[in-house]
Image (cartoon, rainbow, N blue to C red):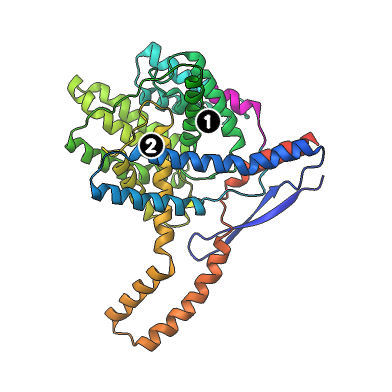
Amino acid sequence: MAQQTVDLHINPTEDLRTFRIPVMPDVDGPSLPRFLLGGIKWLLPLGLRLLIGFFYVAAFFAHHKPFKAAVLVFLGLSVFAGLLEAATVPAAVPVLLFDDVVHVTLGALAVQLAIRTAGMTAVQAAALVGVLAWLSGRLKLLSPRVRPASLYCGAFVGMTSSHVLPGLGWLTLAGILAGILYSLANHFCVGVGGKLGTVAFAGTAITVALARLAGLNHQNLAGASVDPALQVAALGVAIVSVPLTYWLSEHRKFGAVFASAMPSAVLVFGVNLLSTSWQLKMIPLGAAWFGASFAGMTSVERLAGRHWTLPLIGLIYGFLSMDSGPRLHGFGGGLGTTALVSVLAAFGIARLLGAKPFRFARNAWKAVLSGQQPLKFLEDLSASQRRFEAVRRADQKIILKRGAGALQRPAYSRLAQQ
């Protein structure tokens, strides 16, 4: 079967870069496999988008004052705009790999083992598994087929509270389902921080639904009240965590898993040196740092030069993680889904600010301040608009460079099976 490629563009500033992504043509063979592949390719991203919408409504909308409700509505619209930007690659062929399922499940069980036997908190256990996964890959202690990201994704499933899924059997099922989604959803939101947590939350939520159908009703956990001063501190922690994680991952080239897990582990284990009262105060700060670090795992290609969005992402995450949410306490992957929502909201805001009315108002205000003549301003605006339209048409096919790896693996696997 001949291999095909697709040219996909990205615009980090004004320089367009092109990457050739190997994709698969229509799969030959019986109609049923082709129908299932086509259905998964479109239905899985649609289901994950609906899940993000459900999470946003269920986690953050409660009894709020009008101002907070208005902010949440605006962020919701921004998330929708961000989803339009983080579009799925239509040509990707989803392939289920058994190794991914095993590794995600092992990551979930490892975190639960650390929580139940070593007395660690969920954040400590997940950060430790992330560090060990990165270190094992760095030292080549694991098979090349084992990716640290798959173990890290499983770690988020393992953070599920025993009040939500009381038995290891249910947790194992959540890990298996998350592993299946992790393998099939390689082409969904490539390079967007929080994707791993969103996949973990999807596996956990499906398992909780199945458990309810089996007659097991989980306890609805209430979030612990946090002092207002600590809420403000958590907001500041989130604003710092996102840019630092991004800097370690992209500029220092440590990788996203290390950039998220290592500083988080240093922070959450370092608080053990403090007194008991201070340890309790630092728990929400550690969780805020850990969750915000997932948003900082966004890739440089996906950020596309919009570095000003990094503190904005942290600000949005901090706002959502304060008394406004999340309400789905005890669900594994909740922090990561909040991070993904924050990233999409920031990208949506950037997209909205680039809309024509905003650009016209901004340029007009600059012209007024500079004393430029109206006719000259309109001429300049027309020329700049033509340049913008050319760039925008290229941006409509945006994809990340490292998305190539995520798409190559399923494509090559399909080729090997022919």
Left or right: residue 98 versus residue 296 is right
Callout 1 environment at 10 Å: few (<14), some (14 to 19), or many (20+)? many
Callout 2 environment at 10 Å: few (<14), some (14 to 19), or many (20+)? some
Indicate the amino acid at tag 1: Pro
- Magenta stretch bounds: 95-105
Which part of the image, by quadrant, shows the C terminus? Answer: top right
Where residue 141 sits, quadrant-wise, is top right
Left or right: residue 342 versus residue 70 is right
Q: Residue at coordinates 75% horizontally, 51% vertically from top-left?
A: 4
Q: Main secondary structure of the magenta part?
A: helix
Q: Position of residue 305 (x, y in %)?
A: 45, 57
* Discs 2/1, front: 2
Whole-Å distance between the Cαs marked 2 and 1? 30 Å
Q: Earlier in the sequence, mark 2 or mark 1?
A: 2
| Rendered image: mark on residue 285 | none
Indicate the amino acid at tag 2: Ala
* SS at badge 2: helix
Which part of the image, by quadrant, shows the N terminus? Answer: top right
| Rendered image: mark on residue 58 | 2
Using the rendered image of the protein, determine whether residue 142 is visible from the camera's viewpoint.
Answer: no
Q: Position of residue 272 (x, y in %)?
A: 26, 21
Q: Position of residue 309 (x, y in %)?
A: 38, 53
Where residue 99 sits, quadrant-wise, is top right
Q: Residue at coordinates 55% horizontally, 61% vertically from top-left?
A: 395
Using the rendered image of the protein, determine whether residue 29 is visible from the camera's viewpoint.
Answer: yes
Q: Position of residue 383 (x, y in %)?
A: 48, 80
- Residue 162's place in the image compared with 63, above or below, is above
